[in-house]
Each structure stands twice: as C-alpha cells, then as structure tokens.
Image (cartoon, helix red, strand yellow):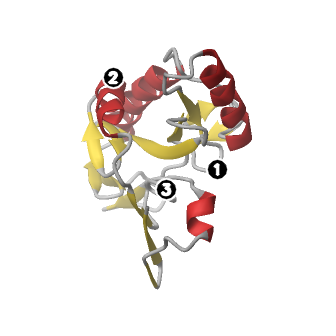
C-alpha cells in the first residue's frame, strides 16, 4: 500500500486451506484477522486505512519532512514558535522508516519532541490507545501532551518503536528505567 512518495507499507497475507498449490487459500490472514478473499481484504482492511492516511496527509498541520526527518520538522517548529511564542506548535509527518506510521512533532518549550502514531483499519493507535478519527487523536493529544510517556520497542505490525518520544538528552542522562531481551522499556 502506498503511503506517500517513496513510502510503501507491506502486509503479509498468509493463505490457509489451499486446495491446490496454484489456488488462493480459502482463508487469508493478516495478523490475526481472517478474510475470505482479496476483495474482503481491500474492503475491510485496505480502504479504511487509505481513508485514514488521506485524513492525516490532508490535515492543515501535515508537513512533508522528507520521510520524517526530525531536523526538518524541528526547523518548522522553531519558525512557528518564533511567530507565536505562547503557542505550542505541532506538525504531522509520514515516516519513511516505518511506513503506515506518522510523527507528531511539537514544541512545548524550546526543545522539539516527537511521538509516533500508527494507522489501523479501525482508527489511529497512539500511546496504546485507539482513536476513530484524527480529530479525536489530536484533541486527546492536546489535553495529554505533557503526561509522561512510557514506550515499548516491540516487534509487531505497529511502528517500531510502536510509540516513542525522542528526547536524546534524557536518554543520555540515564532516564532509561529497565531493559529486557527483545524489549526495551523507557520511562521519561
């Protein structure tokens, strides 16, 4: 599925109950979701995600940052902060390194912050919560942007990291609370 120029999202479709090696399986799986045929995948899985991706990319605060380059977004945020210092500017941008995921970049003070949300067929996933629309996600974000973010780096169909707040200085200062094999938990 094309997300943006040069950004493609790949989904593995597992075929089950094949009658012949050249025939399509009777049951198709994407993750744990079952489908009967390719038309159902398009209708129930692809089309809702295309609609939601379009919702993000046509949002008034969406900016092309060449695939989620944080320096590009930081510069845009700084310019907005200079114009309106009492406002918390924010922008949305697609991520080339994690197709189907988007950055929300914001600047509550003089340092840019970045978090990731992903697109699912049933809405947007942000900070482990699901939102049916981008407006609901942004409304919730505006109320809770300053709350501590606990992030997990996991292997899944979500973004890797599934959610994160990029604060390199905090990491370097040792605010990492615990490590385990295959999963890193960071508390800010």
Q: Position of residue 17 (x, y in %)?
A: 30, 62
Q: Label 1 vs label 2: CA separation? A: 25 Å
| Nearest to the observer: residue 120 or residue 68 | 68
Could you tell me if residue 125 is visible in this image? Answer: yes
Q: Earlier in the sequence, mark 1 or mark 3?
A: 3
Point out which mark residue 126 bears: none
Mark 3, residues whose alpha carbon is within 10 Å: few (<14), some, or many (≥20)? few
Q: Nearer the viewer, mark 1 or mark 2?
A: 2
SS state under label 2: helix
Give the residue at x 33% y 48%. Answer: 147
Find disc 3 in the rendering and name its residue: 22
Number of marks in the rendered image: 3
Residue 171 found in image quarter:
bottom right
| Nearest to the observer: residue 100 or residue 11 | 100
Q: Earlier in the sequence, mark 1 or mark 2?
A: 1
Mark 1, residues whose alpha carbon is within 10 Å: few (<14), some, or many (≥20)? some
Taking the view exactly as shown, the residue that stands out farthest to the front is 86
For residue 4, side relative to residue 127 (left or right):
right
Find disc 1 in the rendering and name its residue: 97
Give the residue at x 49% y 18%. Answer: 59
Q: Earlier in the sequence, mark 3 or mark 2?
A: 3
Relative to 9, residue 76 above or below: above
Relative to 135, residue 33 above or below: below
Q: Position of residue 102 (x, y in %)?
A: 52, 39
Q: Position of residue 20 (x, y in %)?
A: 41, 60
Location of the C terminus (image quadrant): bottom left
Could you tell me if residue 26 is visible in this image? Answer: no
| Nearest to the observer: residue 71 or residue 25 | 71
Find disc 2 in the rendering and name its residue: 135
């Amino acid at each position: 599925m094309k997300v943006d120029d040069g950004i493609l999202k790949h989904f593995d479709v597992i075929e089950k109950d094949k009658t012949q090696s050249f025939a399509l399986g009777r049951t198709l799986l994407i993750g744990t979701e079952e489908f009967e045929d390719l038309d159902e995948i398009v209708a129930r899985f692809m089309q809702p995600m295309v609609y939601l991706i379009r919702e993000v990319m046509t949002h008034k605060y969406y900016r092309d940052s060449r695939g989620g380059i944080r320096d590009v977004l930081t510069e845009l945020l700084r310019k907005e902060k200079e114009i309106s210092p009492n406002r918390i500017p924010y922008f949305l941008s697609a991520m080339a390194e994690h197709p189907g995921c988007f950055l929300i970049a914001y600047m509550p003070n003089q340092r840019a912050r970045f978090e990731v949300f992903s697109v699912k067929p049933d809405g947007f996933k942000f900070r482990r919560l699901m939102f049916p629309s981008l407006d609901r996600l942004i409304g919730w974000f505006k109320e809770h942007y300053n709350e501590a973010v606990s992030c997990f780096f996991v292997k899944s169909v979500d973004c890797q990291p599934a959610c994160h707040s990029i604060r390199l200085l905090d990491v370097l200062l040792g605010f990492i609370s615990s490590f385990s094999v295959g999963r890193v938990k960071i508390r800010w």
